[in-house]
Each structure stands twice: as C-alpha cells, then as structure tokens.
Amino acid sequence: MCLNIGEAAGCIYRLLDSGESNMANLKNHLKENGFDSQVAFMAIGWLAREDKICMTKNGNSWSLSLK
C-alpha cells in the first residue's frame, strides 16, 4: 500500500510541476492514472508532511501548488 501511495504522490508532484491545480482536477487526474480518492488524499498528506506543497482554500474548494 505504501508503494501505491508513493506512486500517487509522484503523479501529483508531476501534475503540480506544470502549475497549480484544484482538488477536482487532481482527483480526476489520479483516477485516470488508476488511483482511487482514498489514495489521493493519503498522497496529498504525504506531500504535505514532506513540505512539498502549498494548499489554499478558495471559497468551497482547495487549490494545490508546489512550494
């Protein structure tokens, strides 16, 4: 499972390397790459714990970017 979370974190990192993304786009991108929403949230937590991402709340949605 940990390997799967790490792969999803890498997928998120590569997506954010091209610019900011909101949670809906991020979850859709991960779904297209074979990851479910639970793994998506764990991967976001992984990147947040490593201090790799910034999270900003815009109204009712969240946007993520690399630091």
Image (tube, rainbow, N blue to C red):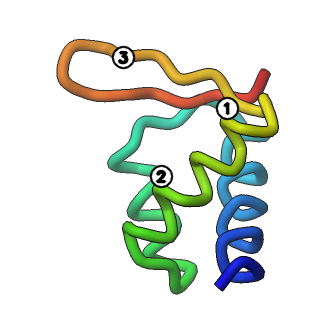
In the displayed structure, 33 sits above or below 64; it is below
Q: Which residue is mark 2?
A: 26
- Packing grade of label 2 (10 A; few <14, some 14-19, many >=20) is many
Identify the mark nearer the N-term, 2 or 1. Answer: 1
Q: Position of residue 56 (x, y in %)?
A: 46, 16
Residue at (67%, 32%) from the top-left corner?
19
Using the rendered view, name the quadrant where residue 27 is placed: bottom left
Secondary-structure class at tag 3: strand
Name which residue lies at 63% across and 22% down.
Answer: 54
| Residue bearing the label numbered 1 | 19
Residue 3: image location, x then y, percent? 77, 81
The percent coordinates of residue 60 (x first, y second) are: 18, 23
Amino acid of disc 1: Gly
What amino acid type should be assigned to the residue bearing mark 3?
Lys
> What amino acid type is highlighted by mark number 2?
Leu
Callout 2: SS: helix
Q: Position of residue 53 (x, y in %)?
A: 69, 30
**Mark 2–mark 1 distance (CA, rounded to whole Å):** 11 Å
Pick whichever of labels 3 and 1 is earlier in the sequence.
Answer: 1
Which element carries disc 1, helix, strand or loop? loop
**For mark 3, what is the residue?**
57
How far apart are the two marked residues, 3 and 1, measured between alpha carbons? 16 Å
